[in-house]
Amino acid sequence: MANEFDWIVVPDKESVKTIKPGTAYTYDLVNMTISEALCYQKRDFGINLGFTDPGESSNIRFLRKSGTGDIKYGEMFAIGVRAGRWLYYQKRDFGPNLGWSELPKFEWRFDAEDGRTGTVSVIELVGLYNSVEKDTLMYERRDWGVNLKWFKDAGKHDSFGDLKEVANRIKSIKEGFSDWFG
């Protein structure tokens, strides 16, 4: 089921309670639908993104355009992915419209489901909003590329998976008839 607010930020140290921008990869962006962390992963189609065990990573860093202090709800920031570069909206033929930039793109923000403002705490469900796409990034199965979609695309781009499911049902029915009629 599609969920706009299914991300948490996990720090590499238990003592960290908020999200501090910086140059080191000290966080994971964990999707709670699958309980795995976003990471760089080579793919044949779409952006080279995938998921990994959050206990073995620290793949993400955040950067703000200016200022200091913790990241706040509604504040724009850039997302750096270890082994990739800076994640940003980019139109493409396969997978979600995401690409890599050599320079930070300050087009992401965290949203709270209840609309609260202030500092974003780690291990708190958030929506990952992109200001260019004007939509929230979420986990959902798709035919090509990493299993990420924009919320407005929920239920789309997964026809191959649906066809496989139908084929498996037909196979099951056929096997059932074989059992009956020998």
Image (tube, rainbow, N blue to C red):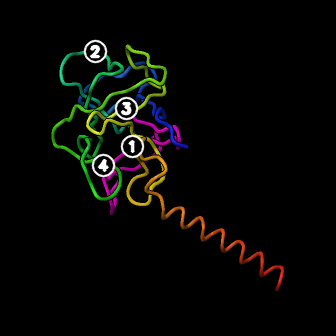
| CA distance for labels 1 and 2 | 29 Å
Q: Which mark is residue 150?
A: 1
Sequence-first disc among 2 and 3: 3
Q: Secondary structure at mark 1?
A: strand
- Label 1 crowd bin: few (<14), some (14–19), many (20+), radius 10 Å: many
Of callouts 4 and 2, the N-terminal one: 2
Q: Residues within 10 Å of mark 4 (few under 14, many from 20)?
A: some
The residue beneath circle 4 is: 97
Q: Label 4 to label 1, Cα distance in Å? A: 9 Å
Q: Which mark is residue 27?
A: 3
For marks 1 and 2, give the one nearer the viewer.
1
User: Is 25 in front, or is 150?
Assistant: 150
**Direction from residue 146 to residue 21 in the image, left or right:** left
Task: Name the residue type under label 4.
Answer: Asn
Q: Is residue 98 magenta?
A: no
Secondary structure at numbered mark 4: loop
What is the distance, in whole Å, between disc 4 and disc 2 at their CAs? 30 Å
Seen from the viewer's position, the closer of residues 137 and 40 is: 137
Tell whether label 4 touches label 3 (CB within 8 Å). Answer: no
Q: Earlier in the sequence, mark 3 or mark 4?
A: 3
- Amino acid bearing label 1: Trp
Few, some or many residues within 10 Å of mark 2 (<14, 14–19, 20+) = few
Mark 3–mark 4 distance (CA, rounded to whole Å): 23 Å
Magenta residues, start to end: 27-56
Proximity of marks 4 and 1: CB atoms separated by less than 8 Å:
yes
Q: Give the residue displayed 81% in from the left and 79% down from the top.
A: 179
